[in-house]
Amino acid sequence: MKKKILLIHTGGTISMSENEQGEVSPGDKNPLSATPIITDPNLTIDSHELFNLPSPHMTPHHMWELSSFIDSQVAEKSYEGIVITHGTDTLEETAFFLDLTVQTKVPIVLTGAMRSSNEIGSDGPYNLLSSVKVAASSEAKNKGVLVVLNDEIHTAKNVTKTHTSNIATFQSPQYGPIGIVTKRGASFHHSPVAEDKYAIKDVTKKVMLLKAYAGMDSTIFSLLKNMGVDGVVIEALGQGNLPPTTMAGLKELTNANIPVVLVSRCFNGIVQDIYGYDGGGRQLKQLGIIFSNGLNGQKARIKLLVALEETKDSQELQRLFLR
Ligand SMILES: NC(=O)C[C@H](N)C(=O)O
């Protein structure tokens, strides 16, 4: 029996071409559909162009549309693996959104490219081929949503874009990749420890992401409270500390029951309530600020957007952010 794989195109450099002026942009026809890249006789490949967007144009609504599309296609047409092509700028956000919300258990792999389809050394077709190998592998099951580029297999939870142009841009700084791709297929050396799923019906909330810096004050927090946001994520300093001048604004947010989630602007480690000085983690914890577990800022924002569809209770949110 041939394995049925669905390719879903959403846009990004992998679907773009460069013109004579060196400008890279999407065209009317997806260059990936021009040549058959996957010729494995054991696979049946269907493809569908859901969007043709540069990934800075992706919104949580597009991500939700993609998530629902995957579940409905697997239910209706019994696909056994899904591969999604995506722009690399926000790929990690879509991957993590899908990791939290897609209900199907079949392998789901996201990929992209740093060089467009007609550039020398274009990495798109190769990454697509590698991703199909991973999606078709039975070992890829129960590992959550995966991101495959440059011969490496990463989890949606840990992967991040680390370089503006290098093809080795996707890395998992804390834990490394969980497998590699070779000519023979996918080879895994680690498994994720836990699954984190939410059966949401829509994405309706507004969550802002801020980065802390030396001398930060309360202005932005007061503005956010008055704008009526549903939640705020702060990339805090070090192990989870903020300048003391932010405390007044943070109190305004927590008094208004607006959840505030703390991550670190360091790209390794987790935040904890260690420091007892003004603005230190212990005061932040006492204020009811939610501490995250090693997610980066953009992914903690995605998780808060999703989790807020289930609860606004800060203790419950804190429990969810420890997963
Ligand atoms: N390499 C890429 O795909 C980057 C592009 N700006 C995008 O995310 O759509």
Image: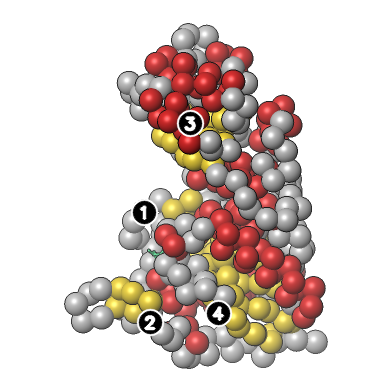
Check disc 3 and report the residue beneath it.
Answer: 226
Of labels 1 and 2, the one closer to you: 2
Tell me the tag on residue 82.
none
Q: Which residue is mark 2?
A: 27
Residue assigned mark 4? 49
The quarter of the rendered structure image containing the C terminus is top right
**Viewer-side label of 2, 3:** 3
Q: Tell me the amino acid under the disc marked 1.
A: His
Label 4 vs 1, first from the N-terminus: 4
Amino acid carrying mark 3 in the image:
Asn
Q: Is residue 121 visible?
A: no
Residue 264: % across, % down:
48, 32
Tag 3's secondary structure? Answer: helix
Judged from this view, the residue extending furthest toward the top is 277
Q: Where 123 falls versus 225 (above or below)?
A: below
252 or 6: nearer the viewer: 252
Q: CA distance from mark 2 to mark 3?
A: 42 Å
Residue 163 circle label: 1
Alpha carbon distance from label 2 to label 4: 13 Å
* Amino acid type, callout 2: Gly
Q: Amino acid at mark 4?
A: Glu
